[in-house]
Image (cartoon, rainbow, N blue to C red):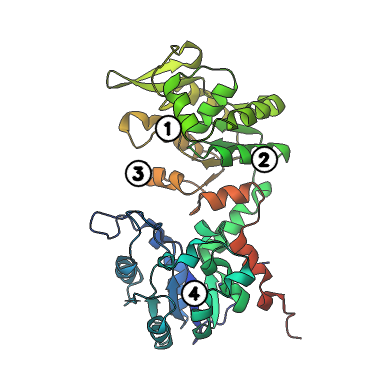
């Protein structure tokens, strides 16, 4: 059982808090969207209100990317969200970082520099080895405890995620706690259960479909987006060169065989699109999958109304729906219909759980609300749905401090 903030004596304790605030960045290298910061406000506010001394650890972007920037603007925004001063220091484990942490008073907060500015953080290690990295070995001596609230990164085994709970008492923050409670108890949700798998994470989505169907967790799997296109090809539909070339270029061609095997084994439980929307003469045009013109054709950009009607009928009888991935190219107004209508239908289901990543981004962009739970993590959520362990959670549960017997 993962320890939470309820198990932590906070007052006067110096706590390293790993969050996931990896966010869109504007042209001026500052935050363009603060949704991920707002997700962690409850955890940080609680620790500060209870007299903790909080050092925030986080990453932003990947080396070489346009969004690979410092966390200074994140600190500024956190100060506004927390309604208290938040210091920023452009170091993570150096003397400057340690001094900033040592100088904290009860209720103070400092944001340390982007952990990925240091090459070790972009590698993955076993927890014991992660504890020996410069980041952990340099910073852990000035911390009393470690809180992991970064569910969205929990499927990775980088030093800031798995190293600290090897040498410090480790706890789950409120975001992490909520995600584990919901995603870790899917089998307890109302039946029938319907999984809507869309977007472009084809391999992960097929893994999920196999897993939930084999274990009897899903009564239906609805496919859309690139995932749906792969299943259409697996079912013998000629989508034309435009869609097929995209699937090939993304390295998903081998996944067609896996999708075909899934249809052979569980075809009665797997729903695939009946029509798709393409761009023709600058406008949305819907075509039945058996009427698609051969040859180059136009790329399938969304599911059509016939598919939506089919999927709505399945959702009307569902007790739980799990959604991961948009139904089409929702970023373009002409092709947002499938995602909008499918997700709106899901809000009428008793329990509606939304995976994070691109899915959460689609919700914000389309202004969709009314779900039982919206996950902060994409890859981490998918991993939990396939019953795969999350390294960061395993590190919290298996750390030496968590293994000590309670005092009599």
Q: Which quarter of the image is occupied by the N terminus?
A: bottom right
Q: Are marks 1 and 3 in contact (CB under 8 Å)?
A: no
Compare marks 4 and 3 and give the one earlier in the sequence.
4
Question: Is label 4 or label 2 in front?
Answer: 4
Disc 4 target residue: 135
User: Residue at the right extreme?
Assistant: 408
Q: Position of residue 65 (x, y in %)?
A: 35, 54
Disc 1 target residue: 328
Q: CA distance from mark 1 to mark 4?
A: 41 Å
Residue 41 visible in this rendered orientation of the protein: yes
Question: Is label 1 or label 3 in front?
Answer: 1
Q: CA distance from mark 2 to mark 3?
A: 29 Å
Q: CA distance from mark 1 to mark 2?
A: 23 Å
Q: Position of residue 293 (x, y in %)?
A: 43, 11
> Which class describes the residues within 10 Å of circle 2: few (<14), some (14-19), or many (20+)?
many
Relative to 335, is 268 on the left or the right?
A: right
Q: Residue at x 48, y 54 (%)?
A: 376
At numbered mark 2, what does the secondary structure look like: helix, strand or loop? Answer: helix
């Amino acid at each position: 059982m993962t320890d939470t903030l309820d198990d932590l004596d906070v007052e006067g304790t110096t706590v390293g808090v790993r969050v996931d605030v990896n966010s869109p960045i504007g042209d001026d290298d500052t935050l363009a969207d603060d949704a991920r910061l707002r997700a962690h406000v409850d955890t940080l506010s609680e620790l500060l209100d209870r007299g903790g001394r909080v050092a925030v650890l986080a990453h932003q972007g990947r080396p070489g990317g346009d969004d690979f920037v410092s966390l200074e603007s994140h600190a500024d925004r956190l100060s506004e969200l927390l309604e208290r001063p938040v210091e920023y220091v452009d170091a993570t484990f150096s003397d400057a970082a340690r001094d900033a942490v040592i100088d904290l008073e009860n209720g103070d907060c400092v944001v340390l520099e982007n952990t990925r500015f240091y090459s070790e953080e972009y590698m993955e290690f076993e927890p014991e080895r992660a504890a020996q990295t410069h980041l952990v070995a340099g910073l852990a001596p000035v911390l009393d405890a470690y809180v992991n609230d970064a569910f969205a990164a929990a499927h990775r085994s980088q030093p800031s995620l798995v190293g600290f709970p090897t040498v410090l008492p480790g706890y789950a923050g409120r975001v992490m706690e909520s995600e584990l409670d919901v995603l870790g108890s899917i089998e307890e949700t109302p039946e029938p259960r319907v999984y809507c798998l869309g977007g472009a994470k084809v391999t992960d989505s097929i893994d999920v479909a196999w897993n939930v169907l084999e274990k009897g967790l899903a009564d239906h799997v609805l496919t859309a987006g690139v995932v749906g296109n792969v299943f259409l090809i697996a079912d013998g539909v000629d989508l034309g060169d435009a869609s097929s070339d995209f699937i090939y270029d993304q390295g998903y061609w081998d996944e067609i065989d896996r999708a075909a095997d899934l249809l052979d084994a569980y075809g009665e439980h797997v729903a695939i699109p009946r029509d798709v929307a393409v761009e023709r003469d600058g406008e949305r045009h819907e075509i039945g999958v058996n009427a698609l013109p051969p040859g180059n054709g136009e790329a399938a950009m969304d599911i059509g109304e016939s598919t939506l009607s089919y999927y709505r009928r399945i959702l009307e009888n569902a007790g739980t729906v799990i959604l991961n991935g948009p139904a089409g190219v929702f970023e373009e107004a002409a092709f947002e219909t499938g995602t909008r209508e499918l997700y709106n239908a899901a809000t009428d289901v008793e329990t509606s759980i939304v995976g994070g990543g691109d899915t959460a981004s689609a919700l914000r962009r389309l202004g969709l609300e009314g779900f039982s739970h919206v996950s902060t993590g994409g890859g981490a959520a998918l991993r939990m749905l396939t019953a795969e362990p999350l390294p960061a959670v395993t590190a919290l549960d298996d750390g030496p401090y968590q293994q000590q017997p309670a005092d009599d």
